[in-house]
Structure formats: C-alpha cells, structure tokens
Amino acid sequence: MNLDYPSFWKTASSKRKRIYLVILFFVVAILVTIAGTFVPLSQSESQQLVNGVQSETNQTSVALAVNIFSHNFEICLTMFIPIFGAVFGLFVMFSTGIALGAEIRVETAPGYQSATTPAFSAQTAILALVAIGAVFALEYVSYSTGMSESLWLFRRIQQRRWRHEIKNLLILIGIVAAILAISAVIETLTIKAGF
C-alpha cells in the first residue's frame, strides 16, 4: 500500500518531519482532552473525582513536586512504546479531559463555595493563567513527543533501522524528563499558591 504523502512531508527533512508529527499529536491531544470533558458524570461522581485529585496535593512542596514529576514521567515513558504508546497517550488525554470536566462541573455547581479559593487581583489571576498555561503546554509537548516517537520508532523497526533510532529515543527521553521536571516545579508552586 503506497500512501501519497503531501509535498510538504515529502520534501521535509527527518528533523522537520519529527516536528510536524509532534505538532500533529499536540493538536490531536488537545482535541481528545476537550472530547473527554463532555463525558457525562453525575455531580457526586464529579465531586469524588475532584476530592481524589485534591487529596493528593496535601504534601510538602518537595514531595509534591517529586510525585508530580514521577507520575507524569512514568506516563510519558509509556507513551514511547511503539504503537501502544500513542494509543495509551490518547487514552490518558481523554481521561484528563474527564477529570477537567469533573472539576468544571463541581466548581460551577450552584452553591459551590471553596474555603481554599482566595480572592484574586487582576495581576494574580493573569499570573495563575500563565502558570497553568505553562504547565499545560510543557506537559502536552512532552506527551506529544512521546506519542510521535512511538510511531517513529515503530517505523524504524519496520525498516530494520531501529538501532540508530535508539540514540534519538534516549535524547528525547532526556529532553522530556527536563521539561517535565520544570513543569512539576511550576505546577507545585501553582498548587501551593492556591491557584
């Protein structure tokens, strides 16, 4: 079966193709996450899910950052597995959407009042949005990198050129480890600041 690839793909270097694939997975991951927010959950199911997530944040800052990093890095490493990693990654993105949908339902429920929600100034609200956006972007870039390498590695295995790809795989794992470490620190600071 011969696929007719678009001309921008045919003329692109291997490096540029990798970037295109990461961007494609980034967009698909966002769409899958958005789809997950529409999964209908009852108010009690949503509250249970939110309580479970909030209970994990009652740790010291260092312990929380280490736990966030190890959790996200473990998930991301799984995404590097040929073919399975891409499917697993999209499942994780969908599950993330379900959790976000639950959070939205709980916080927009009539009479919802959180004792931990501080009043924000405009500057604090902007800072919170920037921090949350940075965490989102860093994590999704890492996950998209893992999922795209999952396909790239599968292709190299088919071509019997997988030994050369191992070097790229290790470099990408190192890069996403650094990105996820930065993300974990920002997420911890955001959580501890009460955002």
Image (cartoon, rainbow, N blue to C red):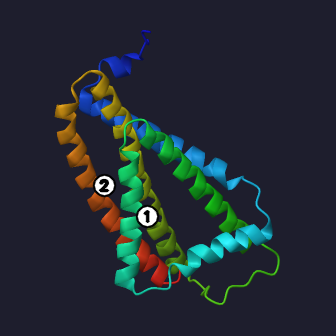
Residue type (three-letter) at the residue carrying disc 2: Val
Residue type (three-letter) at the residue carrying disc 1: Val
Give the answer, above or below, for where 183 lies relative to 63: above
Kindly indicate the quadrant of the structure image that contains residue 159. Answer: top left
- Apparent side of residue 154 relative to residue 35 in the rendered image (left or right): left
* Residue marked by disc 2: 176
Q: Nearer the viewer, residue 97 or 118?
A: 97
- For label 2, the crowd category at 10 Å Cα-Cα, with few meaning under 14, some 14 to 19 and many 20 or more, is many
- For label 1, the crowd category at 10 Å Cα-Cα, with few meaning under 14, some 14 to 19 and many 20 or more, is many
Mark count:
2
Give the answer, above or below, for where 76 lies relative to 16: below
Give the answer, above or below, for where 12 lies relative to 193: above
Give the answer, above or below, for where 194 lies relative to 3: below
Answer yes or no: is residue 115 visible. Answer: yes
Q: Nearer the viewer, residue 125 or 14?
A: 14
**Element marked by disc 2:** helix
Q: Position of residue 56 (x, y in %)?
A: 52, 78
Q: Position of residue 82 (x, y in %)?
A: 37, 37
Q: Earlier in the sequence, mark 1 or mark 2?
A: 1
The residue positioned 48% from the left and 47% from the top of the image is 89
The residue positioned 59% from the left and 50% from the top of the image is 94
The residue positioned 39% from the left and 53% from the top of the image is 76
Mark nearer the viewer, 1 or 2? 2
* Residue marked by disc 1: 135
Kindly indicate the quadrant of the structure image that contains residue 185. Answer: bottom left
Q: CA distance from mark 1 to mark 2?
A: 13 Å
Q: Position of residue 23 (x, y in %)?
A: 41, 40
